[in-house]
Amino acid sequence: MYKCKEIIELTSQNMETSLPWYTRMEMKAHYLMCKTCNRYAQQLQFMNKALGVFEGHVPTENCQLSDDAKQRIAKKMCQVKETAE
């Protein structure tokens, strides 16, 4: 039986390549017993799907921020920095 650390690594590998069926079955058995690893796998799948929406989206022109946008970002960053201190 795999340990949680190994399951986390295998979960990531399984998203990139297809693992052997017996390994996937052991992973599923582990997910049934371990809420934390199950939650991790679900979150990883969600992020993969969410990022898949942006996959292949490449801007056709050089994207530049307006001066107004730059000022708003700088202001927000200062606010976050002040809050953290």
Image: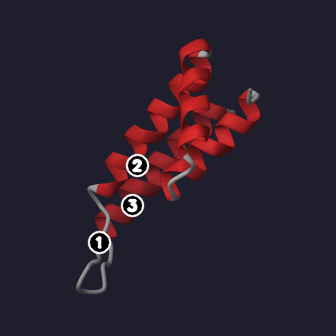
Q: Which residue is mark 3?
A: 71
Circle 2 — which element? helix
Residue found 54% across the figure and 16% down from its top: 32
User: Which of 79/55 is in front?
Assistant: 55
On screen, residue 56 versus residue 13, left or right, reads left
User: Which of 49/25 is in front?
Assistant: 25
Residue found 53% across the figure and 43% down from its top: 21
Image coords of residue 72 (percent x, y): 36, 55
Identify the amino acid type marked 2: Asn
Identify the amino acid type marked 1: Gly
In the figure, 61 relative to 48: above or below?
below
Q: Which residue is mark 1?
A: 56
Residue farthest to the bottom, as pictured = 61
Residue found 41% across the figure and 44% down from its top: 47
User: Which of 34/70 is in front?
Assistant: 34
CB atoms at circles 3 and 1 under 8 Å apart? no
In the figure, 23 relative to 38: above or below?
below
C-alpha gap between disc 1 and disc 2: 14 Å
